[in-house]
Image (spheres, grey):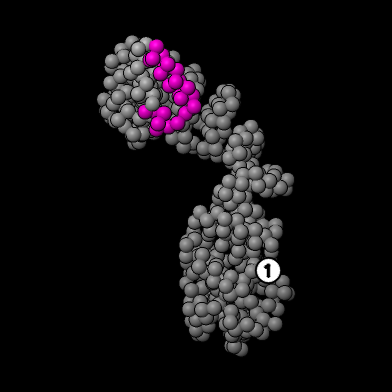
Amino acid sequence: MKIHLLYPCFLFGISSLASDHSAPPGPSNSIDPLWQEASFRRAFTASYGIDARIEPLVNAGEKEVLNQVAELMKKEDREGAIAKLVGDSNLNESAALIFTLGNLRFESGAVEDALVNFERAIALHPNFRDAHRNLAVALVQQSQFDAAEPHLVRALELGARDGLTLGLLGYCHANADRSQAALQAYRLAQLTMPEELQWKLGEAHALLALNDARGSVSIYSQLLEQRADDGALWSNQADAYLQLGESVPAIANLEFARRLNQLNPAETISLGHLYLNEGLVDSAMECYQATLSGEAEAPFDKLVDALENLTRFRRWHEAGILVEALSENPRFRGRSDNDKGITSRLMRCRGLIELEAGDPTIGFGLVQSLVESDPLDGAALILLAKFQAREKRFEEAELLLQQAASLDAFAVAAWRELGKLLVQAGRYGDAVNPLRQALEREPDANLSQYLDAVERAAKQEG
């Protein structure tokens, strides 16, 4: 029989992390009931050293110390057990004792000290399999995935086949965007830990990254049968549905998570976007406005996204309501002042709302001030050109669009608008080139048909 030097502490409850599916696996708060088990006592104090290739030999003196530590742990005296090990004169030269100290410190939350202990145990016994594994566990908890991975691999080389080692290796692979390797590791981990939520989530994430969204949906469906009150699972499955292009079930999932009060403000805004895409404006506004008054503060840039989305759908009334709410909400008042990009986006939205559904003079002034402060603001240049075209000032509009077309990020939009402007002015022949430029940079079936029609008109004109 052999002693495992607190090996049971590795088998912590990773599933306690289910409430935060994005977090790396880590230890549960306590495994103290384990110390009362007779099986642990036998493993902890039994003869040791059956396989010297992967475990250090334990002499009689070390065994006696471990026995005393076990007695202290049976009394739930963790600090006493740590003190006993720290005070032992043979500690620094005993891989078994220093490894056990590392385990106790890890369980106590002293992860940095535990790392030092595990590294020392490996230095004393380089093939100490479970020291490699526990060092990796501690490194993963510290988000040092690159450092953890070689120790997990070494543990596997030394014969580890447990779900924890394989699952954490999957997590390291996933963190490095090696999705196929992550998928294999997560599936192997489930052979010995078939009920572990984190490995199932990892498999679902890996499948999604490998464009097998249907497989990912299937896993989430199985999990939701048992955990229907877990909003994170509903949200994750919604991501998979969206990858499949199935927005309606994605909306249903996110709405269910919202009603569980488990949807954060950014996700609630995303749900609003989905509603708006489906033409459900009232539901979209309900989501957008809910983030203005909730306990958790919404990211300001996401709210500006919502505002831009409303203007994109030409929902001027609702956009006006949202921009007014942003202006009046003390949480967000002056928020854009320290971010030039946000300031410009917000002013463009305000200008566009005024131009389309308010006072065009005010709108023109807002957008013109943006161009004056930043002549390279392509979006503002295009917006100002649209206003000029509406006022039949085609020459000014053309100059503005040519200026915007010189900016790579706005070239396609500017060429398209210039082509439409020239068509509006009856200059079909002149419109062909900018439309063709836009089409070459960004193929579009509708634009291609429009260009064909313009070319026919140009030939007739000529």
The residue shown at (64%, 76%) is 4
- The segment highlighted magenta reads 437-460
Q: Is residue 440 above or below residue 226?
A: above
The residue shown at (70%, 57%) is 195
* Residue 198 visible in the snapshot: no
Question: What is the total number of numbered labels drawn onto the structure image?
Answer: 1
Q: Quadrant of residue 273?
A: top right
Query: Where is residue 113 drawn, in percent x and y?
Result: 48, 69
The residue shown at (52%, 56%) is 178
The residue labelled by disc 1 is 34
Q: Is residue 107 above or below residue 70?
A: above
- Label 1, secondary structure: give it: helix
Query: Where is residue 405 drawn, in percent x and y?
Result: 32, 28
Q: Is residue 192 above or below residue 2?
A: above
Task: Determine if the magenta segment contains residue 444.
Answer: yes
The residue shown at (72%, 74%) is 39
Circle 1 crowding by C-alpha within 10 Å: few under 14, some 14–19, many from 20: some
Name the one closer to the observer, 68 or 356.
Answer: 356
Name the one closer to the observer, 199 or 85.
Answer: 199
Amino acid type of the residue tagged 1 in the rendering: Leu
* Residue 445 visible in the snapshot: yes
Task: Determine if the magenta segment contains residue 142.
Answer: no
Q: Which quarter of the figure is the N terminus placed in? A: bottom right
Name the main secondary structure of what is drawn in magenta. helix
Q: Quadrant of residue 17?
A: bottom right
Q: Which quarter of the figure is the C terminus placed in? A: top left
Name the one closer to the observer, 235 or 113.
Answer: 235
Residue with the most extreme bottom position = 60
Query: Where is residue 296 drawn, in percent x and y?
Result: 52, 38
Query: Where is residue 228 drawn, in percent x and y?
Result: 70, 43
Q: Quadrant of residue 403?
A: top left
**In the rendered view, does 313 fall on the left or right side of 15?**
left
